[in-house]
Image: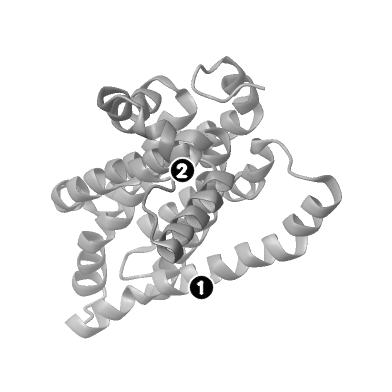
Amino acid sequence: MFLCMPETSAENVLYRRVARLRALTGNEQLRSQSEITRGHTAFSAIVRQALIKPIEISILDPAVMFVNVYTSFVYATYYSFFEAFPLVYAEIYHFNLGLVATSFLCILVSCVLGVSTYVAYLWFYLEPDIKKNGLRVQEFWLRPAIAATFLPTIGLFIFAWTSCPDIHWIVSIIGITIYAFDVFIILQCIFVYIPMSYPQYAASLFAGNDFCRSALACGAILFARPLYINLGIGRGVTVLAGCSVLGIGGMFYLYFYGASLRARSRFTVKG
């Protein structure tokens, strides 16, 4: 679908203007430069540019591979909650079906908090900084993610080991709220970092990332219930929390060494 879209914002504006001229004049021979260029591009080159190249980047570029793995893990963990919540709030806390459903509202609360926090960061810090210093290097946009990277693991551990009859249910809800709130912040930073690093492949990379996230999230529905039943909620969620520790290391590595990785990558635009 994005094969026909211009690759830069300037081309995008020109494309829209030409399309409007065509509509106003009725002259279908009017073409933008990007349309002319694409008209002389072989189909095999288009397929490679739109399909094969993003897959190649996702496999061979460590930054993109980390982003795909990390975001897929986050989505898989989130979807595993659809199996964990009934086991915790119905079987441990004896919620009825309606109350179990309302426990998912903590995700909505965390999203509202995440949106408010991130918008405040953009408004009060990032926008004034851009006006003063201009656009900084890509890794600068990961700073909120660095500040938040420990908290998803902490939130999962809270949920894992406070989901028991002796502890009030609100504590485990707080753990999930912390997890989802900080994951929202981290994902916003990642989804800005990637298109800034690979602008010519941004649309395709987002599509590839969405495929990875959706595929693993689908698998989570299958493995989550056996995981939680066989290991119990505490140990089962601890497995996920332990895996999330790898994301902490990956995020710090991306922040401190992302520029070096990008300089050695054959996929980034040079100059």
Point 65% across, 45% down: residue: 141
Point 27% across, 56% down: residue: 79
Point 46% across, 24% down: residue: 62
Q: Position of residue 194 (x, y in %)?
A: 51, 39
Q: Secondary structure at mark 1?
A: helix
- Placement of 168 over or under 42, stated as above or below: below
Point 41% across, 53% down: residue: 156
Q: Residues within 10 Å of mark 1 (few under 14, many from 20)?
A: some
Disc number for residue 79: none
- Placement of 12 over or under 173, stated as above or below: above
Lower sequence index among marks 2 and 1: 2
Q: Is residue 243 visible to us here?
A: no
Q: Specify whether 95 is left or right of 256.
A: left
Q: Secondary structure at mark 2?
A: loop
Q: Looking at the rendering, which quadrant does residue 99 occupy?
A: bottom left
Q: Specify whether 91 is left or right of 8.
A: left
117, 32: nearer the viewer:
32
Q: Position of residue 242 (x, y in %)?
A: 40, 39
Q: Amino acid at mark 1?
A: Val
Name the residue beneath numbered marker 1: 112
Q: Position of residue 226 (x, y in %)?
A: 13, 49
Q: CA distance from mark 2 to mark 1?
A: 34 Å
Q: Looking at the rendering, which quadrant does residue 64 occupy?
A: top left
Q: Specify whether 66 is left or right of 41.
A: right
Q: Amino acid at mark 2?
A: Pro
Name the residue beneath numbered marker 2: 6
